[in-house]
Image (cartoon, helix red, strand yellow):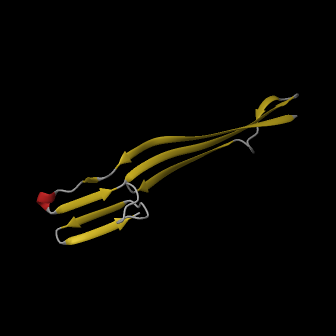
Amino acid sequence: MSTSCWHFDKVVHLFNIDLSTDLGLDALGLSFKTTGKAQADLAFSIDIGFGWNKNFGFYLDTGVTGVQLGARLILTGNGVTAGNPRNLFTGQGSIGPLQLDFTR
């Protein structure tokens, strides 16, 4: 009885988009402005264990065989500036007089 294992890794870049925009409805007093970019990645890893047994033939080794899947969303700024020295994704939203500032 002999067992072999194959391993595959892959990262797929799904998109990289600019999110610097104003998504608000100023006429209704709703404001939502963002500055930065979003990047999404999908990563997967596959392990396949298999072997040959002279009595039973080909088999898959279920102790080794498996799939791992992961997704990642990265938010960044539009570059280092005096007002944003750490290159962070920023945004500002408001409903009438209430305002919310956020940074990632």
Residue closest to the far left = 27
Instruction: Write down the quadrant of residue 25 in the picture.
Output: bottom left
Residue closest to the far front = 82
Q: Nearer the viewer, residue 16 or 6?
A: 16
In the image, 61: left or right of 17? right
- Does residue 81 sit above or below 64 in this rendering? below
- Does residue 81 sit above or below 69 in this rendering? below
Q: Nearer the viewer, residue 92 or 53?
A: 92
Instruction: Write down the quadrant of residue 89 in the picture.
Output: bottom left
In the image, 82: left or right of 26? right
Q: How many labels sit on residues?
A: 0
In the image, 93: left or right of 28? right
Residue 51, position as x, y percentages in the image:
80, 33
Q: Nearer the viewer, residue 42 or 80?
A: 80
Residue 38, position as x, y percentages in the image:
40, 51
Instruction: Write down the quadrant of residue 52 in the picture.
Output: top right
Which quarter of the rendered picture does the N terminus lie within?
Answer: top right
- Does residue 101 sit above or below 70 in this rendering? below
Q: Residue at x 33, y 51 (%)?
A: 19
- Does residue 27 sit above or below 3 in this rendering? below
Which quarter of the rendered picture does the C terminus lie within?
Answer: bottom left
Q: Residue at x 37, y 46 (%)?
A: 17
Q: Residue at x 16, y 68 (%)?
A: 96
Residue 47, position as x, y percentages in the image:
69, 40
Residue 27, position as x, y percentages in the image:
11, 58
